[in-house]
Amino acid sequence: AQSVTQLGSHVSVSEGALVLLRCNYSSSVPPYLFWYVQYPNQGLQLLLKYTTGATLVKGINGFEAEFKKSETSFHLTKPSAHMSDAAEYFCAVRDDSGYSTLTFGKGTMLLVSP
Amino acid sequence: DGGITQSPKYLFRKEGQNVTLSCEQNLNHDAMYWYRQDPGQGLRLIYYSQIVNDFQKGDIAEGYSVSREKKESFPLTVTSAQKNPTAFYLCASTTRDREYQPQHFGDGTRLSIL
């Protein structure tokens, strides 16, 4: 079975500082990995995905993530935080059920202070 | 623009009442999903459907029911058997292409108990 662990339910950064949100996964099949962002009372928006190929994946809004198989990690980074980045972030891994379902982490709330 | 429409945005349920949440997509996606989101719990899968007239239980299907009579519609009924229905409900969809495609999400329905 798949699982996703997001370290830290809340992460606080100052505007302009580096953003690092951690995600570790377990999967019995080659992992497809995703990061989604959720603003209050809205649905989830895809930030980026890793399926195959290059292990450094670039997404929207200046975010990127690196797939490290040896560490079973897929951490999300952004060099310089902006106030508009304040939101909840979810890491997800494809299930091996063959039904294109996902297993989500519990989410990390990013707080950005001026 | 194509997308997923969930309605209503807010819904209130009385004790012993069944309520139905609507999810419609015009993305021509085959697969559709219902998730429940509680604070600090991430997203948990309720039901999913890969094709019309077929659906499978997810991790927390008890107290819920669905139908898939049309490709574009996947309504979720929260029955009176669901004793703790207060949550944010998200609908998602995706294609079933050869390469896995990420799920697209609606903006959610917030259900509360009166």
Image (spheres, rainbow, N blue to C red):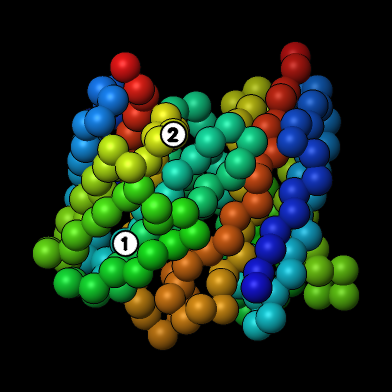
Residue A73, x across and y down, in percent: 80, 63
Residue lying at the far right in this picture: please name it.
Answer: A70
Report if residue A4 is visible in the image. yes
- Can you identify the residue that label 1 sits on? B32
Chain name for mark 1: B
Instruction: Return the chain for callout 2.
Output: B
Would you place residue A22 above or below residue A26 in this image? above
The Cα–Cα distance between marks 2 and 1, rounded to whole angstroms, is: 24 Å
Please identify the quadrant where the N terminus of chain A is shown. bottom right
- Above-or-below relation of B16 to B44: above
Q: In this view, does B4 lie to the left or right of A86?
A: left
Q: Is B82 in front, or is B99? A: B82
Name the residue that disc number 2 marks. Answer: B84
Q: In this view, does A100 lie above or below A39?
A: below
Q: In this view, does B95 lie to the left or right of B73?
A: right
Q: Residue at x 75, y 17 (%)?
A: A113
For residue A19, what is the image quadrant? Answer: top right
Which residue is outermost to the left? Answer: B69
In this rendering, do the residues under marks 2 and 1 share a single chain? yes
Which dot marks residue A64?
Answer: none
Residue A105's spot in the image, x, y percent?
65, 51
Q: What residue type is labelled 1?
A: Met
- In the picture, the quarter occupied by the C terminus of chain A is top right
Give the mark, 2 or 1, whose residue is nearer the N terminus: 1
Dividing the picture into quadrants, the one containing residue B114 is: top left
C-beta proximity under 8 Å, tags 2 and 1: no
User: Badge 1 local density, few (<14 within 10 Å), some, or many (20+)?
Assistant: many
Question: Is residue A60 visible from the viewing direction of this image?
Answer: no
Tell me residue A9's x, y (percent): 74, 36
Asked if residue A6 lies left or right of residue A60, the reply is right
